[in-house]
Amino acid sequence: MNDALFFIQANSLMLLFKVLILILFFVYIIYTFIILNRVRALNRTIQVTGAHASVTLQTITWIFFLLAVSLFIATIVIV
Amino acid sequence: MPDIFTLPNDQQETKLAVAPHPLSEKNLSVTKPSALSSSLPDHSDSVGLFSAYCANPTGVRFINQEDDEQVVLFLRRHFITNIPWIGSALFLLFVPPLFFWVLNATSFTMFIFSHQFILMVVAFYYALVLNFALINFISWFYNVGLVTQKRVIDLDSTNILNHNLSETNVANIVDVSFTQRGFFQSFFNYGDVHIILENVGSQFVFNAAPKPDKVADIISDLKQLQGGSGT
């Protein structure tokens, strides 16, 4: 009986943590999306075409956004 | 077979003469005002990802730039001002290995968490650290001061949620000064350039600009070219 109770409690706790980290990843996705849009807006204001600097930075922000989405999906699948 | 028509030698030379390049020395002297020739270099530098000071730059465009408007000076904060956040980010990168090393050393186990969960928490942590570095870099990258032959533009990106673009005509500039405080600013030759405008109490400040003496000199020269009473 005690073992079963411990199992349920541990599983509930794990579920709670999983939901918590999913919420954190979701907030992180929104945050990276805000950064992505900010960089796009700033690139409209000033364009540093030398060494493709502006394009490189925008690509990096895209990578961050996609990374955040990937981590969110990975959390759902793995944990 | 005799030639039907041959050009005289002098005309052949004229025809073979190469047309002057648009950025040749002669043309540059036309586009670059003579009063600025002492302050600005003859060559043009391309603005790169980490450029903080570029006189007579190429590869930079800004919103509402006029066709005949040429960027004379491109400024960001000196790269050395990024050292604090780079150091913090590097330190934060080493925190998880240190944390797990301490756990191992003390034989403490986080038995309640699965390995997958711990992996995702660590991944989230590293994502946050990289984001911290990215935001700081973006704030530095888009904190730009531009000086053209017509106006001065200051783009401030204080945080990720807002940015501010201010500009003024060179003719509105009353006074240009710069300050260098402390050991690092003197050693790495950067400082704050203050551009006082005609409107009482309003000024532009290029924070931590590299070579502030040259910046102030170029802006003063531009002011003189505009026919004002430059300093």
Image (cartoon, rainbow, N blue to C red):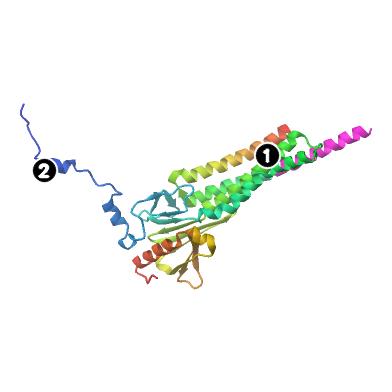
Q: Amino acid at mark 2?
A: Asp
Residue A14, image quadrant: top right
- Membership of B40 in magenta stretch: no
Q: Amino acid at mark 1?
A: Ala
Which of the pair B68/B34 is nearer the observer? B34
At a point 68% along the width and 38% down the height, the residue shown is A72
Label 2: which secondary element: helix
Task: Please name the residue that numbered disc 1 is placed on.
Answer: B123
Measured in 3D between alpha carbons, the distance from the residue under mark 2 to the one under mark 1, in whole angstroms, is 75 Å
Q: Chain of mark 2?
A: B
Task: Please name the residue that numbered disc 2 is placed on.
Answer: B10
The relative height of residue A42 versus residue B198 in the rendered view (above or below) is above
Q: Is residue A30 visible?
A: no
Looking at the picture, how far across and down is residue B158, in whole percent? Answer: 57, 57
Query: Which quadrant is the N terminus of chain B positioned in?
Result: top left
Classify 10 Å Cα crowding around label 2: few (below 14), some (14-19), many (20 and above). few
At a point 77% along the width and 34% down the height, the residue shown is B114
Classify 10 Å Cα crowding around label 1: few (below 14), some (14-19), many (20 and above). some
Q: Tell me the magenta residue range.
A: A1-24
Looking at the picture, how far across and down is residue B206, in whole percent? Answer: 49, 61
The residue positioned farthest toward the left in the image shown: B2
Of marks 2 and 1, which one's residue comes earlier in the chain?
Answer: 2
The relative height of residue A33 versus residue A10 in the rendered view (above or below) is below
Image side of residue B230 versus residue B15, left or right: right
